[in-house]
Image (cartoon, rainbow, N blue to C red):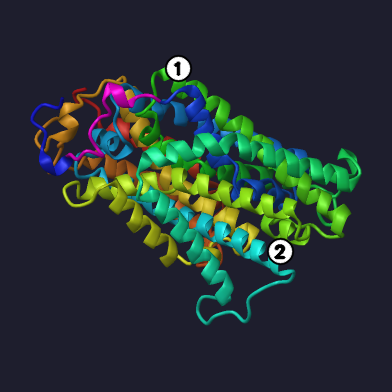
Amino acid sequence: MLHDPDPSLLSDDLAPTAAAERTWTAADLAALWIGMVVCVPTYLLAGGLVDLGMRWWQAVLTIGLGNLIVLVPMVLTGHAGTRYGIAFPVLARASFGVRGAHVPALARGLVAGGWFGIQTWIGGSAIYQLLGALHGSAIGGVDLPVLGINGAELGCFLTFWALQVVILVRGIASIKALERWAAPFLVAMGLALLGWAWWRAGGLGPMLAGARTSHQAGVAGTRFWALFFPSLTAMVGFWATLSLNIPDFTRYARSQRDQVLGQALGLPVFMMLFAFIGVAVTSATVVIYGEPIADPTALLGRMGSGVAVIASLVALTLATLSTNLAANVVSPANALVNLMPRRIDFRTGALITAGLGIAMFPWKLIESTRGYIFTWLVGYSALLGPIGGIILADYLLLRRTRLVVDALFQRHGPYAYRHGINPAAMLALLAGVAPCVPGFLHAAGLVERVGAIFAAFYTYAWFVGFVLAASVYLLAMRGHRR
């Protein structure tokens, strides 16, 4: 029971979870991660790195290393959710202030809105391919003006969007049920796809040989390291989103052991497995079809119109659904609840997020491999890295994991700072983001060239922002009472 909370900072969705609500086991959290990891963007990651010049094993190891790195802040931030039962926007109040917390919460929510749109587009594409397989030929017509997609693609996109909305109105309990049921099925289907590629290509050797075409023989030496470091940053950035708002889920965990073990089993292990499936199957298509087919929806459309293809496309739709609802709806919904607790509940926040996913024209965000990895993934890691650095520096180093939960819901307590905003956190956020802005503008094609130092900052955007923001925050908070 909270003592003297301010009604404008509290709602049923933001209140600390009661003991009866903390029922998620390690298996539940592992299933959550498997459901989020098994998705088309994960499948495309390794293939994208191979397309940029890596060998297949270099791509898979880069992805694995990136996920082991991001697992550390994931578990550390998740500690606060399990210990105090609080969601990410509430945790952010300790460092940013009860009003300043809107900045990191909405920044994280905006990125999630973009991902929600991307995943919804991918789910719609699976439906589009399924209809084409049933029809026996491609469907659709000329592209619509402004949108750049045809009417059938738009209709499938909106159909998948509506399917998610139906689930969202049922609340977060429905997401947990979906993840637990979907996880084993999705792993089985991924292995089945790998088995099909192995059979059709004539073994593992021919499969992986397809990854080394004449223009993709693998870079080496300084050229490899020039590709490796920004790619590693992008891999960290892939789940930098969840490393912030993971308390939204760990607040339901039974214990710290459950949250740590569940995340350690579910994230890096299955991320590497599914990335390997992606690059191996894509390589096999060179042998099977004479050309690489990186997009699994396009691949399944080429396989024919049999029952196996339909089942695979249904699995692909389910994979996208399980990822999108957990990874890209909970955070922005909670951010909007935190913005106006008395007017917005979780369902309303989720519906607003769904609307944002349409407005962002998500198909344009993933038009190219380079744009997807170096502009989208690295770009938002430059924003989220500093936020993560500030929150963890505050929670672990400044406060030694000790929070006054009642004060997180009070406008005049220790987390009020100056008019509800902590100037030290805002200064640190600016200091962490600023060095990476020139590099982002260059990657996005908005400026022609930048200095070598700014290019280097952007190459290591998440790491630079995390360390710099954490350091500035701790310096600015010297003498502050814990």
Residue 20 placement (x, y as % from top left): 30, 23
* Of 345 and 2, the residue lying toward us: 345
Residue type beneath disc 1? Arg
Q: Which residue is mark 2?
A: 133
Q: Mark 1 Cα within 10 Å, few/some/many (few <14, many 20+)?
A: some
Q: Quadrant of the C terminus?
A: top left
The front one of 446 and 405 is 405
Pointers 2 and 1 in contact (C-beta within 8 Å): no
In the rendered image of this protein, does residue 386 appear above or below residue 306? above
Instruction: Give amino acid for label 2.
Output: Ala
- Residue 358 screen position, x and y as percent: 43, 64
Q: Is residue 349 left or right of residue 479?
A: right
In the image, 382 versus 473, the foreground residue is 382
* SS at circle 1: helix
Tell whether position 14 is magenta.
yes
- Can you tell which mark lies on residue 257? 1
Considering the whole magenta stretch, tell me its main secondary structure. loop
In which quadrant of the rendered view does residue 35 lie?
Answer: top right
Which part of the image, by quadrant, shows the N terminus?
Answer: top left
Q: Closer to the observer: label 2 or label 1?
A: 2
Q: Is residue 210 above or below residue 203?
A: below
Stretch of the chain drawn in magenta: 10-23
| Secondary element at tag 2 | helix
Label 2 environment density (alpha carbons within 10 Å; few <14, some 14–19, many ≥20): many
> Which residue shows up at 48% across the image and 53% down it?
115
